Image (tube, rainbow, N blue to C red):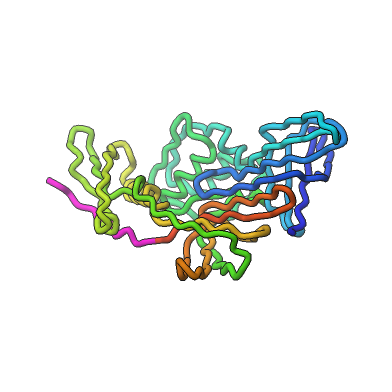
Amino acid sequence: MADISISLFDLDECEAKVENIISYELCEDCDAPCDSLSLTFLSERALDEIYRVQASVDGIQVFSGYVDTQREQISDNGFVCFIYARSSACLLTDSEAKPFTYNSPSALGLFKANCDGFGFSYDAGDIYCENQYQVSKGTSRFSALQDFVYSVTGDKIRIDCNNALTLMKTKNSRTLKGNVISIKRTINRANALEKINYKLNSDRDYIYCRESAFMKKRKIRSQMMKNLAYVEDWRRDKALSSIMKSKNSEYYTYTITVSGFEKIDLMDEVICFDGHFGNIRGIVYSIVHTQNGGAEQTCIKASVEFDLEEMTYVDE
């Protein structure tokens, strides 16, 4: 059993340690800017208004965020309390960026323009381009950064549990050696994509094509139309690759449930051997830690990486 410690902070920044945890669920997902923590516990009294939550496991911080929902209900044993919180990235997803056109922008410059005053640090490296980058009205502060970084590097960004902005890249390889409860394999052909037909000028047909030879070999025939006339030239290739990669990211996945609080990070490479599936190797894109009735489990979803064998051509 992992030693989990959860602290609640009221509006006066007074800290209270959570005792008598009934259940918790800590979720991380590559497609969600914010992690989430759902927590149910017993309290002898009604809580003051809570606005911030921190959680650590075996002395290492795993969550830092802000409360969206707080509920208390009277019971025979005092109060049953519920807290739902999102990680600190919510400060950027819930706030709109200033519409602006940047000349020769850098990720650090965009970070300073959009994240100043929120208490974040920058740890994403030297990322820049010599073109223009436009932030449109209605774009969140998070998306203003995310869209730029992805356009330049092909990597997503993440605000980690220590409030640092980092790149989501594969860093570690983890081998699961035991305590595997179940393994599920999924081949999802429904959402897979073979071809993108696109146009670069508003008065021309969709004659340009980006195709995945990998998906074509697997008899995937789904196609989509995209108008890229208003996407800057330097962003188009990454935009196409982004669509193709996103649509096919969950084509072949494994869901692995292990007992206990498995210390693993998003984008880690996970490896394990199963007598039925053989050698399993994939990139972690979702992690859910749960405790209910005293039993801890970690559900890991990993995507098997393939070379999509992308080709671009003009279909006159």
Please give the name of the residue rendered at 43% of the width and 47% of the height, measured from the top-left corner: 104
Q: Nearer the viewer, residue 97 or 288?
A: 288
Which residue corresponds to the image point at 78% horizontal and 51% vertical from the top-left? 5
Residue 306 lies in quadrant: bottom left
Q: In the displayed structure, does residue 60 sit left or right of residue 278?
A: right
Q: Is residue 5 visible?
A: yes
Q: In what quadrant of the picture does the C terminus appear?
A: top left
x%, y% of residue 159? 60, 48
Start-end of magenta stretch: 306-316
Q: Does residue 137 belong to the magenta stretch?
A: no
Q: Quadrant of residue 204?
A: top left
Residue 312 lies within the magenta run = yes
Q: Residue 11, percent across and down?
A: 79, 33
Residue 302 sits above or below residue 81 on the image? below
Observer-nearest residue: 195 or 151? Answer: 195
Taking 259 as reference, is 9 above or below it? above
Q: Position of residue 55 (x, y in %)?
A: 73, 49
In the picture, measured across the screen, residue 210 lies left or right of residue 167, that is: left
Q: How many marks?
A: 0
